[in-house]
Image (cartoon, helix red, strand yellow):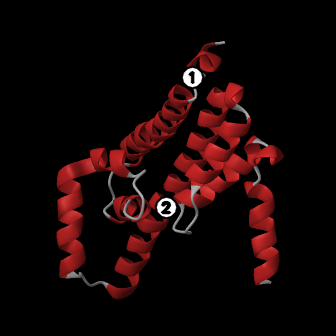
Amino acid sequence: MESSIQAFLQAISVPWVGLTSVGIMSFLAATLLPFSSEAVFFAFLVEFPEKVWPLIAVASLGNILGGIVNWHIGYFAKNTKDSILQTKNTQTSKLSAYLRQLGSKSLLFSWLPIVGDPLTVFAGWSKLPFWPCCIYMMIGKTLRYVFIAFVYLISNNSLGTIFS
């Protein structure tokens, strides 16, 4: 079972499979699963620099959808916990109060490794408003891919490919 999962993940992470693999890996990387969407994004960018805009769009969309799934996991987990236990955890309440103080804007940092994915779950747990959370996730996650592509294209003197 484990080897078949590894074989599947290796197959979809190969850049010449297509943009679908980038979207799937970006989605999986945005969930709490330990994947790196940047590696697949970069491999595809190296192979097909002329497809930078569709690549950014697909990777961003997959990553944003994964963040939305995380938000819903947190939201429904909080509702379930509250309805079953009817108790409050003071440490969780402190963290939730801090996140509410920062608000949805804190999800501009949802692209960060290690803390970004739990941040999206905790935003749902704290019941931050859904649509502002989506907008800030979209901005942060998309800017990450734009930055990676920009740095790569500048370093290879192929910035002109994105405007042609």
Query: How far, Cα to Cα, is label 2 from label 1?
Result: 38 Å
Q: Nearer the viewer, residue 9 or 132?
A: 9
Task: Residue lying at the far front in this picture: please name it.
Answer: 156
* Residue 25 percent coordinates (x, y): 65, 55
In the orientation shown, which residue stands out farthest toward the bottom?
85
Compared with 150, 60 (above or below) is below
Residue 115, compared with residue 112, is above or below; it is below
Judge the density around disc 2: few (<14), some (14-19), many (≥20) Cα neighbours within 10 Å: many
Q: Residue at x 21, y 72 (%)?
A: 93
Q: For numbered disc 2, what is the local secondary structure?
A: helix
Residue 111 position (above or below residue 160): below
Indicate the quadrant containing the C terminus: top left, top right, bottom left or bottom right.
top right
Rendering coords of residue 7 (x, y %): 81, 70
Q: What is the number of the mark on residue 70? A: 2
- Residue at coordinates 46% horizontally, 35% vertically from top-left? 147
SS under mark 1 = loop
Count of numbered tags: 2
Vertical placement of residue 7 versus 22, above or below: below
Q: Position of residue 54 (x, y in %)?
A: 67, 30
